[in-house]
Image (cartoon, grey):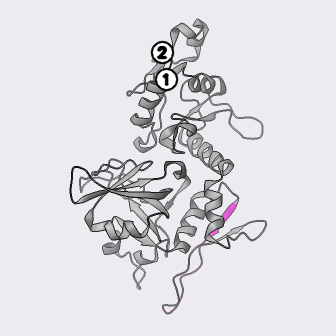
Amino acid sequence: MAKAVFTTKVSPSYDDLPERRYHFPRTYLNQVQQALGDWIVYYEPRRSTGDVMSSGGRMAYFATARLAEIVPDPVKSDHFYALIDTATYLDFVDPVSFADGDFYYESSLRKPDGSTNKGAFGRAVRVISDREYDTIWRAGFGGLIGLKQAVEAAPAPETEVPIARVADSRASFEFETDREVIEQLVSRPFRDRAFATAVKDAYGHTCAVTGLKIINGGGRSEVQAAHIRPVHDRGPDSVRNGIALCGTVHWMFDRGLLAIDENFSILSAHDRLPDTVQRLLPSNNRLLVPEREDLRPHPQFLAYHRDHIFKG
């Protein structure tokens, strides 16, 4: 097995839903097969759509997950689906740029003269080492677990291209085995912290329904991160499966007293709520959503909540 990078756009040309599946042509079957059963990272390129003139992509690694299965596309004979273990998908708290000065997280993307290898960069699926994966993971979650990243100076040509040195400001922090990395990634407390941090940051620590932003004396926000499709119903720890809500609204949303339609209008179960609840809702009855389209609630998760949880 090997780790890999899967490239997907904000509005992909392929049938991608990163939290669940990655759609790819036969060209990349060998690379994807190498990663079967192992972990991958998702990369968002500069182009946001299939249009060669499009832009706006973050040019950053933004999530990780475990590749569970590869199945043929039932419609296109030369295409396949890489199926993700939904329970393992996790957005990075801090998207990671592919390069930091002279340092490249994927050594294959850096030419000996220090420039970017555009040929390698053009491949949508790229196999990476455990060490490269570990470095990307640490950078993506470093702020959450108290790590600081320092990139070492470029080495002499005959030496291996270094990876970022990640050290705690208080003590050295090293994972000795790949197993320790994975144990951290699947730990529910860690995932809850990562999900909450990413969702609250995406919404500017503001309740998406009431518009309230309350910060306590310690600098912590009152807002909470709500899963749209619950974790116990195979809901992923994805920003697109989350909404920042204040405590009361979160309680009502989880119990199906509120829901969101495909146009981000707020729905309420009027026969189950007192009239005073309407005071919490905005006058235009619209959810406040992140400016970036790729951080907004995904229609599939909203539909699941309406169909299976909403009592309206």
For image coordinates 51% across by 25% down, the residue present is 309
Q: Quadrant of residue 183?
A: bottom right
For image coordinates 51% across by 17% down, the residue present is 311
For image coordinates 78% across by 65% down, the residue present is 170
N-term mark: 1 or 2: 1
Residue 157, magenta (yes or no): yes
Give the x, y percent position of residue 238. 51, 45
Q: Which residue is mark 2?
A: 312
Label 2 SS = loop
Majority secondary structure of the magenta segment?
loop
Residue type beneath disc 1: Ala
* Residue 165 or residue 35, whichever sits in front: 35
Q: Which residues are magenta?
A: 147-162
Q: Nearer the viewer, mark 1 or mark 2?
A: 2
Give the x, y percent position of residue 119. 30, 74
* Residue 139 or residue 41, whichever sits in front: 41
Q: Are marks 1 and 2 in contact (CB under 8 Å)?
A: yes
Residue 259: mark: 1
Disc 1 crowd rating (10 Å Cα; few below 14, some 14-19, many 20+) is many
Residue 66, magenta (yes or no): no
Q: Residue furthest bottom?
A: 158
Q: Is residue 26 left or right of residue 157?
A: left
